[in-house]
Image (spheres, grey):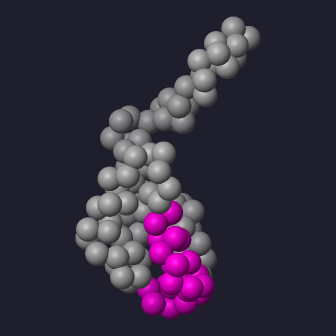
Amino acid sequence: MDKAKRKRLEARGWRVGTASDFLGLTPDEAALVEMKVRLSRALRARREARGLSQVALAHRLRSSQSRVAKMEAADQSVSIDLLLRGLVVLGATPRDIARVLERDAGEAA
């Protein structure tokens, strides 16, 4: 958001902040959320690039389609461990995963 828009909103009584501010996340919690979102996006991108359905990936993971959907949505019930497992099953190397986590927040996963 540009500075002018921010000032207009604040002048009208709005509070402007980040999602982390709104949710009251600590920097550590915010970093974990960001990592989970990046891994989830990478999982979906890798699955789609390989032409696999959620059902096909679920079969490879010995899981369910609904679980894969939750993985791709970064659902709070999904562990980072499961996201990493999904990426590895799809052929991601540790270097690939490191690249996903190193990207600037503005880059596409």
Can residue 63 be seen here? The reply is yes
**Left or right: where does residue 89 sit relative to residue 1?**
left
**92 shown above or below 17:** below
In front here: 55 or 53? 53
Q: Position of residue 52 (x, y in %)?
A: 56, 86
* Residue at image location 45% in from the left, 90% down from the top: 60
Q: Position of residue 23 (x, y in %)?
A: 52, 35
* Residue at image location 56% in from the left, 78% down from the top: 48
Residue 90 part of the magenta-drawn span? no
Instruction: Please provide the residue range marked out in magenta.
Output: 40-64
Can residue 78 be seen here? The reply is no
In front here: 26 or 52? 52
Residue lying furthest right = 12
Magenta stretch prevailing secondary structure: helix
**Where, quadrant-wise, is the N terminus in this rendering?**
top right
* Residue at image location 48% in from the left, 75% down from the top: 46
**52 shown above or below 32:** below
Residue lying furthest top = 11
**Left or right: where does residue 109 sit relative to residue 94?**
right
Total numbered badges shown on the rendered structure = 0
Q: Position of residue 16 (x, y in %)?
A: 60, 22
* Residue at image location 32% in from the left, 53% down from the top: 102
**Left or right: where does residue 99 sit relative to residue 51?**
left
Q: Position of residue 101 (x, y in %)?
A: 34, 56
**84 shown above or below 54:** above
Residue 63 part of the magenta-drawn span? yes
